[in-house]
């Protein structure tokens, strides 16, 4: 099953999240819907963590 997700009207969610086999990092201050979607799908498998890097919401790659 595929889930469509956007972060502040951007479908480039790889910029705003980092997902590995061991953890999922998400930005603080974003939409609760964005965070809840990851949490509902992944929290029973890996930890889902809200964080910031250098006080920005860019967690993944550019």
Image (tube, rainbow, N blue to C red):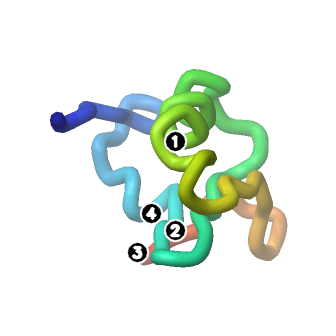
Q: Are marks 3 and 4 in contact (CB under 8 Å)?
A: yes
The numbered mark at residue 15 is 4
**Residue 45 picture location, percent across and down:** 55, 56
Judged by depth in the image, the label closer to the viewer, 1 or 4, is 1
State the residue at coordinates (29%, 42%).
11
Judged by depth in the image, the label closer to the viewer, 2 or 3, is 2
Q: Which residue is mark 2?
A: 18
From mark 2 to mark 4, how far is it between C-alphas? 8 Å
Q: Work out which quarter of the rendered image holds the N terminus and state it.
A: top left
Q: Which residue is mark 3?
A: 62
From mark 1 to mark 3, how far is it between C-alphas? 20 Å
From mark 2 to mark 1, how far is it between C-alphas? 11 Å
From mark 1 to mark 4, how far is it between C-alphas? 15 Å
**The residue tagged with tag 3: helix, strand or loop?**
loop
Q: Which residue is mark 1?
A: 38
State the residue at coordinates (59%, 39%).
39
């Amino acid at each position: 099953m595929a889930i469509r997700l956007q972060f502040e009207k951007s479908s480039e969610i790889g910029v705003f999240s980092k997902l590995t086999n061991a953890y999922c990092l998400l930005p603080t201050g974003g939409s609760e819907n964005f965070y809840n979607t990851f949490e509902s799908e992944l929290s029973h498998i890996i930890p889902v963590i809200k964080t910031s890097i250098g006080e920005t919401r860019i967690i993944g790659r550019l």
